[in-house]
Image (spheres, rainbow, N blue to C red):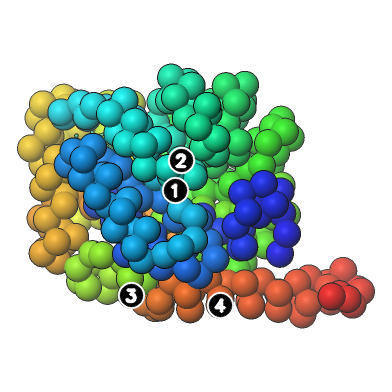
Amino acid sequence: MKTRFTEAFGIEHPIVQGGMQWVGRAELVAAIANAGALGHITALTQPTPDDLGQEIARCRALTDKPFGVNLTILPTITPPPYREYAQVIIDCGVEFVETAGHNPGEYIEMFKPHGIKVIHKATTVRHALKAQSLGVDAVSIDGLDCAGHPGEDDVPGLVLIPAAADKLEIPIIASGGFADARGLIAALALGADAINMGTRFMCTVESPIHENVKQRIVEADERQTDLIFRTLHNTARVARNAISQEVMEIEKRGGSFEDVRDLVSGARGAKVYELGDLDAGIWTAGICQGLIHDIPTCGELIETIMTDADQLIAERLSKIAGYAVVN
Ligand code: NAD
C-alpha cells in the first residue's frame, strides 16, 4: 500500500505505534520496525535522558530499520527535563519524533535543523492546524476512542478524522480505536494516510509487559475502560479496575488531584505491567480491546492486517462497488 505517509516517511506499511508509557521499549519498537511499520520508544518511560540514550542504542542493536521516539508533555507529578530528553534524541541521530500533549513549538525548533521528521499527536482539528503551521511533517489525530489522553472535546474518530482531513495539507495518521484491517481501510476512506495503534501492540508477544495484562486485554470487551481526570481537564482513558473506579468516586465527590495523586501515580501504574497485578495502579487500554482476541508477534499482526486489508478491498468493497480490483 502506498500513501502519503509511506512515501514521505519511507516506511513500508501505513502503520504506526505511538507513545505508550511503560510499554514503548526497545524490544517492541524494534519488532515493529522489523515488520515494516513505524514504532516509537516512549522517552519518559526512561528515568533519565541518559537512560533514553541507552534505550535507543538497545533498539539499534535489535533492528537496522528506522524508528522514532515519543516525547509527551502533559501535567506530571515530577516535571521531567524535556529539553534534555529532546537533546538526547538529537544526539543519538533518531530519525522520527512523535510529540504529544502540549504545543510542540520549542521542540520542533530543536529537531528540524537536524532533519528529524516530527509527527505531532493532536486531539482537535485546531491543535492539528497549529502543529501544521509550526512545520510538523504529519499529524496523528486522536479521537475520543483512544487510550490515554483524548482531550476534552469528545469527538470520536469517525468525525474527527475527516474533519481534520478537510483542513490539513500534511499526512494524517488516524489514532484511537484501531486494531485490525477494517480500521485501516476505514481510516483510509476517512482521509487518513496511516493508522496508529497502541492497545493492539500492547497485546503482542514482544510487548514488554506482564502476560496477565495481555490476557486481560484479550478477555475484556469494549465497555471496560474508564475516563478518569474528567474533572481535572486532563481526561485519561484507562483500563477499568479497582483503582480507576475509586478515582472516579473521589472525582464525583469533588476531590482534587491531591486526593487521587497516590492512587494514580505512574510509578504505581508501572507495577501492573511489571508484576501482573491488575489492581496495583492505573494502567492504560483503549476501547478497541473489544476487537483484540489474540497475542500474535508484531510480524504476524502486521502481516495479518495488510493481508486482510487487501482481501477486504478485493472481496468485500469491490463487490459492493460492483467492479473487480485489478492489481
Ligand atoms: P505521573 O506519575 O506524573 O502522573 C500520573 C497521571 O496523573 C498522569 O496521567 C498525569 O498526566 C496525571 N497528572 C499528574 N499531575 C497532574 C495534575 N496536576 N493535574 C492533573 N493530572 C495530573 O505520570 P507518569 O505515569 O510518570 O507519566 C509521565 C508523563 O507521561 C505524564 O505526563 C503522563 O500523562 C504522560 N503519558 C505519556 C504517555 C505516552 O504515551 N507517552 C501515555 C500516558 C501518559
Q: Residue at x 10, y 64 (%)?
A: 275
Mark nearer the N terminus (1 vs 3): 1
Q: Amino acid at mark 3?
A: Val
- The numbered disc on residue 97 is 2
Q: Residue at x 30, y 42 (%)?
A: 43
The picture places residue 244, in percent across and down from the top left corner, at: 20, 47
From the image, which quarter does the C terminus lie in? bottom right
State the CA–CA distance, disc 1 to disc 3. 20 Å
Question: Label 3: which residue?
Answer: 205
Element at label 3: loop
Asked if residue 124 can be seen in this view, the reply is: no
The local crowd at label 1, few if under 14, some if 14 to 19, many if 20 or more residues have their Cα within 10 Å, is many
Q: Amino acid at mark 4?
A: Thr
Question: Label 4: which residue?
Answer: 304
Would you say 34 lies left or right of 324 here?
Answer: left
Element at label 2: strand
Dot 1 and dot 2 residues touching (CB under 8 Å): yes
Q: Nearer the viewer, mark 2 or mark 4?
A: 2
Mark nearer the N terminus (4 vs 3): 3
The picture places residue 59, in percent across and down from the top left corner, at: 34, 58
* In the image, the residue with mark 1 has its CB under 8 Å from the nearest atom of ligand 1: no
Element at label 4: helix
Would you say 139 lies left or right of 266 here?
Answer: right
Question: Label 1: which residue?
Answer: 68
